[in-house]
Image (tube, grey):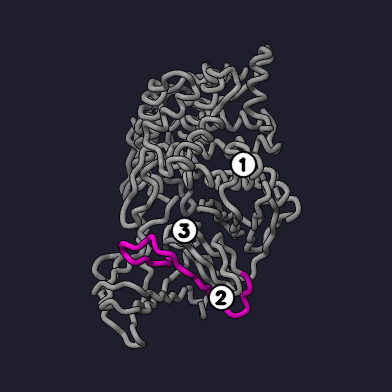
């Protein structure tokens, strides 16, 4: 990276031992953990192949494959990669630092992903630090080894002059590479990250790595994370650590990506490894891989002592409220949402709310319900912790492969002690609404809909200000706006004879259910009048209450669920 301000990585590959007439080099089309075809080859430039110092023929034969006529000789390949997208899923380099996410920079010889490699990073002059989960080569600065391409691709690099902090969990060193100024207290943050990681280890009883790396990028605007085999990349707004809400949110992100160390990186659906980097890798089980991880992120932060019982339960109630109010919850099951991740999750449009509910959201709810189901069946002696640990032991450690959909269900049934076919068919593969209180009763908690009994109108349209004008951004299926013919991109000009200069939704509470409002709108430049009958607000708003009359058994179950594991 001799000119990082131009946003290019310069890559040189040296390959030997390939005896065929031609060698095909491929660039992945997607990054594991982020289920979208991203076409990383679009950023490749100046590809050339050399043997014995002379150029040899290299032809691009499809969107992400270069064929080299090496005639069995050793060769050197050089190319550049443009990297200027701020994301945990892609690569980035500028005058301040470089970040490499392997699938967007490193190619592999087709049919030979099993081969090991040695990687040497040549930082820009003045840059003195490289952080990665790969093992370093003794005596060689910034040189690392990968046993195969999958490990190389799954080991990101942070390159520059970032801060490095360390702590240990269960005797395993953890490195935190912090890029960018931010308002964090290193001592406090390391101590709190240690608490969260320790609670995660308790679920599975072991750390499957000898070293772990957190790459944290503090940005003006940013957020999110991506799991890797023995590391993770996290992005945060640089001011996020200064508020209690922001700080807990960051710890939740830490917990989520760290829990992936087990759930999906090792305990995984059978479709997610070994990877096909050329195309989509379909599975019905992302609601487990991501949804359960989201549930555990909340639970681990709670068990680590950062949230009170009521706050955790409020978060669970809020998640249920959001899901039950989404029309997409009834349009697509958790399994369908998982399978359709490649075309839905990262490609939202104005109608997504009506057709799709993220497997993160639905899976988190189902994970919680299965946890409570197992606790009820075992009188609190076991829960989802034990079921996940057993699956990890069976499929990752013993069988060394992923689980099928059926095997995952059987693993849950083993701990519930009875068939869960009805649960899976209704809630994971179907769209029925669970009886939430039947599950919460186990731990002495009641879910209360505070909207029940109210009779208020709801427009059912999202409205945002665009250049000072109120414009429709979404229309809820079967709501007032939907029935009245309001469209996305309609500009709201007036209502009932008066000019509208703000979000129309602020005016709706002044009306009654059944009232008809008359809107003047501009649609593609044409003025129109729309009469809209206001329908009843059918949304729910759940609050979770700990029962004041809970039995001793319920109280004991609640503590077993929420308290730190011994």
Tag 1 near tag 2, CB within 8 Å: no
Quarter containing the C terminus: top right
Any magenta on residue 191?
A: no
Start-end of magenta stretch: 105-129
Q: Residue at x 28, y 65 (%)?
A: 63
Residue 487 occupies quadrant: top left
Mark closer to the observer (3, 2): 3
Q: CA distance from mark 1 to mark 2?
A: 35 Å
Residue denoted by label 2: 123
Q: CA distance from mark 3 to mark 2?
A: 21 Å
Of 97 and 73, nearer the camera is: 73
Q: Residue at x 64, y 58 (%)?
A: 175
Q: Is residue 264 left or right of residue 183?
A: left
Judged by its main secondary structure, the magenta piece is loop
Q: Dot 1: what SS? A: helix
Residue 561 occupies quadrant: top right
Residue denoted by label 1: 201
Q: Is residue 521 visible?
A: no
Of 342 and 466, nearer the camera is: 342
Q: Residue at x 57, y 66 (%)?
A: 136
Q: Position of residue 145 (x, y in %)?
A: 51, 66
Residue denoted by label 3: 151
> Label 2 crowding class (10 Å Cα cut-off): few <14, some 14-19, many 20+?
some
- Which circle marks residue 8 in the picture? none
Q: Position of residue 32 (x, y in %)?
A: 42, 53
Residue 432 occupies quadrant: top left
Q: CA distance from mark 3 to mark 1?
A: 22 Å
């Amino acid at each position: 990276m001799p000119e990082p301000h131009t946003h290019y990585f310069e890559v040189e590959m040296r390959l030997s031992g390939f005896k065929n007439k031609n060698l095909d080099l491929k660039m992945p089309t997607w990054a594991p953990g982020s289920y979208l075809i991203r076409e990383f080859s679009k950023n490749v430039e100046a590809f050339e192949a050399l043997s014995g110092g002379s150029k040899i023929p290299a032809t691009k034969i499809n969107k992400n494959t270069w064929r080299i006529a090496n005639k069995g000789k050793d060769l050197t390949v050089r190319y550049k990669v443009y990297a200027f997208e701020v994301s945990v899923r892609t690569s980035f380099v500028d005058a301040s630092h470089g970040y490499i996410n392997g699938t967007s920079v490193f190619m592999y010889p087709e049919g030979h992903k099993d081969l090991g490699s040695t990687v040497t990073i040549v930082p820009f002059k003045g840059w003195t630090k490289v952080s990665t989960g790969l093992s370093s080569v003794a005596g060689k600065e910034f040189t690392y080894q990968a046993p195969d391409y999958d490990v190389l691709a799954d080991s990101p690099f942070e390159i520059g002059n970032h801060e490095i902090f360390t702590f240990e969990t269960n005797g395993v060193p953890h490195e935190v590479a912090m890029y960018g100024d931010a308002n964090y207290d290193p001592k406090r943050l390391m101590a709190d990250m240690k608490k969260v990681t320790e609670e995660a280890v308790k679920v599975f009883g072991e750390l499957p790595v000898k070293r772990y790396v957190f790459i944290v990028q503090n940005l003006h605007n940013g957020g999110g994370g991506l799991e890797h085999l023995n590391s993770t990349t996290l992005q945060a707004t640089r001011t996020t650590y200064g508020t209690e809400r922001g700080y807990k949110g960051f710890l939740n992100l830490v917990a989520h990506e760290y829990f992936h160390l087990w759930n999906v990186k090792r305990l995984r659906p059978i479709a997610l490894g070994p990877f096909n980097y050329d195309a989509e890798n379909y599975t019905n089980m992302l609601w487990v891989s991501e949804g359960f991880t989201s549930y555990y992120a909340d639970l681990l932060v709670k068990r680590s002592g950062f949230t009170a019982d009521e706050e955790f339960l409020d978060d669970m109630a809020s998640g249920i409220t959001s899901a039950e109010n989404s029309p997409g919850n009834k349009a697509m099951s958790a399994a369908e949402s998982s399978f359709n991740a490649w075309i839905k999750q990262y490609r939202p449009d104005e109608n997504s709310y009506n057709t799709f509910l993220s497997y993160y959201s639905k899976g988190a709810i189902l994970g919680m319900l299965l946890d409570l189901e197992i606790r009820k069946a075992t009188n609190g002696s076991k829960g989802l912790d034990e079921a996940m640990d057993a699956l990890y032991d069976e499929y990752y450690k013993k069988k060394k492969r992923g689980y099928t959909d059926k095997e995952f269900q059987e693993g849950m049934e083993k701990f519930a002690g009875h068939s869960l076919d009805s649960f899976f068919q209704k809630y994971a593969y179907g769209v029925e609404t669970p009886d939430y209180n039947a599950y919460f009763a186990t731990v002495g908690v009641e879910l209360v809909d505070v909207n029940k009994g109210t009779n208020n109108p709801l427009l059912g349209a999202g409205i945002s200000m665009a250049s000072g004008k109120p414009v429709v951004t979404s229309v809820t299926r079967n709501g007032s706006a939907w029935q009245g013919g309001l469209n996305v991109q309609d500009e709201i000009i007036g209502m009932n004879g008066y000019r509208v200069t703000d979000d129309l939704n602020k005016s709706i509470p002044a009306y009654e259910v059944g009232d008809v409002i008359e809107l003047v709108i501009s649609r593609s430049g044409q003025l129109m009048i729309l009469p809209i009958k206001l329908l009843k607000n059918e949304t729910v708003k759940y609050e979770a209450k700990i029962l004041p009359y809970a039995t001793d058994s319920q109280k004991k179950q609640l503590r077993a669920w929420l308290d730190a594991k011994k």
